[in-house]
Image (cartoon, rainbow, N blue to C red):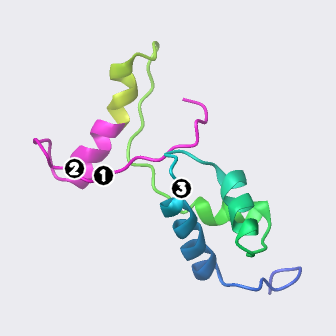
Amino acid sequence: MAKRGPTPSQSDAALTAAVRDVIAASPFHGEGHRKIWARLRTRGLRTSKHRTLAVMRTAECVGLHAAKYGTRFEALEPVRQGVRDHFEGMAAGVATGLTMRHDHGSQ
């Protein structure tokens, strides 16, 4: 059964590429789907906020940590987990060039 509603003018792959271009051109390190959606509209790419959010949700969670007190050390624990798992260990310079993005959501 096909999805209801109008057929989008661009595929999910094309929209994902456009979202990545917007993120790469941004001077900021954390933006949510609403800002990305607005920047896509200024570039002439019309889509819905819901679809932009759905495409942006293809990211991967690489670390998770819960703590009673949110100290700076506790905040870095998920980053440490991601580096350890994806770069096969902890060593000086192992994750050089790695960038971290967030949308200032709930910590």
Q: Assign the C terminus to one quadrant of the image.
A: top right
Instruction: Report x, y in % for residue 63.
Output: 38, 42
Amino acid type at image mark 1: Leu
Q: For the point 69% across and 52% down, which residue is it?
A: 35
Q: Assign the N terminus to one quadrant of the image.
A: bottom right
Q: Outermost residue, right direction?
A: 5
- The range drawn in magenta is 79-107
Instruction: Report x, y in % for residue 22.
Output: 57, 64
Amino acid type at image mark 2: Ala
Circle 2 sits on which residue?
A: 95
Mark 2 or mark 3, whichever is nearer to me: 3
Toward which corner of the image does residue 55 lie, by quadrant? bottom right
Q: Residues within 10 Å of mark 2 (few under 14, many from 20)?
A: some
Q: Are marks 3 and 1 in contact (CB under 8 Å)?
A: no
Q: Are marks 2 and 1 in contact (CB under 8 Å)?
A: yes
Q: Secondary structure at mark 1?
A: loop
